[in-house]
Amino acid sequence: MKILLRLLLAMLLASALQPVSAGQPVVSGADVMPRGGAIYQAADTAFPSSAADIGRWRLSLSPASKVSMFGGAYWLVAQVRNDTDVADWVLVPGSVMIERADVRIYASDGTVQQFSGGYRADYQYPLHYGQRIRLAPGASAVIVVHTDSPFYRAPPAVRLFTEPEYRHLVSVENMLALGALGALAALALFNLFVHLMKPDRATLFYALYLLLYMVAWAQEFLLPAQILGWHDMRWLYVPFFLLPIPNTVFYVEFLQLHRHFPLLARISRINYVLPLLLMPCVLLALPYAPFLATLAISVWLTIALVSGIACLRAGNRQARYFVLAFVALLLPACLILPSNFGLVPPPVNNPELLTLLGGTLDAVLLAFALAHKLRQLAVEKDEALQRLNQSIVQAQTDHLTGIFNRHAFDEQLAHRFDAQRHELAVLLIDLDGLKAVNDRYGHTRGDALLRAFAQGLVQLVGSGVPVFRLGGDEFTVLARKDDVAGLLEALQQVEQSLRAEGFPHAGASVGWAAATEAASREAMVALADQRMYEHKTSRRRARAEDAQQAGAVGMVAR
C-alpha cells in the first residue's frame, strides 16, 4: 500500500508541475496528408477572413507550447491535402469532452466551410462531435479551430474520417456504449429488486453505485445533452465525485472489513469525506473538477483494491471476484486517469469508452461476487436450519429409546387436543417388571428392556401414530379414539415378544381416555393415568391370586 500511495503522490506532483504538452494536432484518415499544425493562445483575435490572410493572421498569434488542463481558449491550425478520390469527409474537433469548438475550413478553391462542434453544439451524428465537410479530390485546405473550454483532458486536436468510415465508427461505439449503459441499468434494477426481496446493505449500495456509474457515463457520452438538450458542464462530474461513497459502503459491508480488518475500514472513511469536500468545485471552480474528481477516484480505487487483496490473502474466497472486478476497472482507468492528471495525452482516441467497458465488466464481476455471497449465505442458512432441526429433534427425542420424549408429548398434545378433539385419545402405558430386571440383572439389561418395549410400541402403532417415553417406565401413545380397542389387543403381542426376548416378567399396564371425556388435556391425561393404575392394580391382584392358587395346588399335590 505504501508503494501505491507513493506512486499516487508522484503522479499528483508531476501533474501540478507539468501542464499538458501541446504536441502536433492529430489528423487521420485514408491518404489525407497533414501539412503541419500548431496551437496558439487565443485572445480577442477573430478568424481569418480568407485563406490569403492566414499567413499574416498566424504571425499575430502567440504559439502555445503548453495547454493548460484547467481550461482556456486556443487556436488550432492544421493543413491537409486530399490525395484520394473521396469528397465527403467528417471532421471531429477534439477526441474527448470539450465545451465548444468553432471550425473553419479554408479550401484551396477559395471556399470556406464553417461549423460549431463540442458539448454545446448540435450533433449531426448521435453522441459524437463529428461534422460533415467536403474536400474535393486533389484539393488542400487549412483547418482553423477555435476551442474554448473550462478544462481540457487532452490537447486540442482534429481528426478526419471518410463519411462511411465515421458512420461505421459511430455505430460501433454507440452500440458498445449504449449496451454497457443498459447492462449497468439492468444490473442496478435487478439488485434493487433483490434488496426489496431480501434486505441487504451490500446489495442496496451496490445498486446505488451502479446507478451513479450509469448516470456519470451517460453524461460523458452526451445522452442528456442530445436527448434533453441539457448542456450544463457544471454537473458532469457530480456523479463521479459521488461514486466512491456507495461503493465504499458496499465493499466495507461485502468484505466485512469492520470484523476482519478494522484499520482498513477506518481508512476507507476517507472515501466518504474526500469526495464531499472536493465536490463543491463543480460550482465554485469548474476547471479543477476533472483533476479533483480524478484524485478522489484514485484514492478510492487504491484503498478498495488494497482492502480486497488483504481479504483475499486472509482466505476470504468471495474477495477473488472483488479483486478481479477492481482490476478490470483499474486497467482502463490507467489509460484515462494519467491524462486527467495532465501527465500524458490520452493514449487512445476514445479512452472514455474503454473505461466504460471496464466499469461494466467491473459491475458484472461484482455481481458474481454478490451472487457468490448470496449463495454462501443460502448454504449457511440451510446448514443453520439443518442444525436447528437437528436440535429440535434432539430436544424432542428420548436419547435412550429413540422415540419422542415428554417435551414432544406436551407440544403435540397441546396442538392436537384442540384441533382433533372429537377423535383424539391418549394411552398411558406403564412397563411392568423393569425394577425387577434392574435389581437382578443391572441397569444395562433394564435399558435393553426399555428399548425393546419402545420398538415394540412403534411397530404396533405403525407410522403416523406418535409414541412417547414420559420418563422411567412410563410410555404414552396419541391415537384416534376408534383405534384404541385394536391397540389394546395388540399390546398383548408386545408382551409376548418381550417374553420371547428373555424378559419373562415384563408386561404392560395401560389406561386410556378420550379428549371428549375431559374438559382439558390435563384432565384427560389424569383420567388415563387413573385407569392405568386401576389396570395395574387389577393385574397385580390377578398375579397374586394366580400365585395363591398355584401354592394351594402344590400343597394338595404333596
Image (cartoon, rainbow, N blue to C red):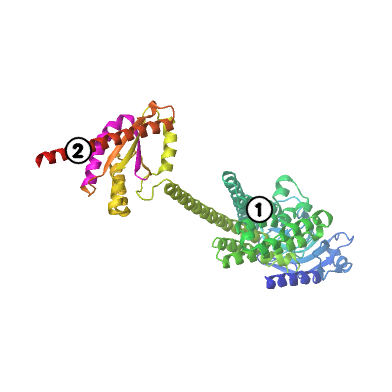
Asked whether the residues under the numbered discs 2 and 1 touch, taking CB atoms below 8 Å apart as contact, a structural biologist would say no
Residue 412 drawn in magenta: no
Q: Secondary structure at mark 1?
A: helix
- Dominant SS of magenta comes to helix
Q: Secondary structure at mark 2?
A: helix
* In this picture, residue 323 sits left or right of residue 283: left
Return the disc, 2 or 1, that comes first in the chain's sequence. 1
Classify mark 1: residues with Cα within 10 Å, few (<14), some (14-19) or many (20+).
many
The residue closer to the viewer here, 131 or 276, is 276
Name the residue type under label 2.
Gln
Task: Return the residue nearer the eye: 556 or 204.
Answer: 556
Looking at the image, residue 42 sits to the left or right of residue 312; the answer is right
Q: CA distance from mark 2 to mark 1?
A: 93 Å
> Quick one: which residue is furthest to the left in this view?
557
Please tell me the numbered disc located at residue 361.
none
Question: In the rendered structure, which segment of residues is drawn in magenta?
Answer: 472-499
The quadrant holding residue 180 is bottom right
Res. 77 in view: yes
257 up-or-down from 408: above or below: below
Q: Which residue is mark 2?
A: 548
Residue 448, can we see it? no
Write the residue at 30% across / 51% down: 439
Quadrant in the picture for the C terminus: top left
Report the residue marked by disc 1.
209
Q: Nearer the viewer, residue 548 or 329?
A: 548
Residue 486 position in % (x across, y down): 26, 33
The three-letter amino acid code for the residue at tag 1 is Tyr
The quarter in which the N terminus is drawn is bottom right
- Judged by depth in the image, the label closer to the viewer, 2 or 1, is 2
Q: Nearer the viewer, residue 76 or 234?
A: 234
Q: Residue 260: horizontal and vertical position, in percent? A: 61, 62
Magenta-colored stretch includes residue 491: yes
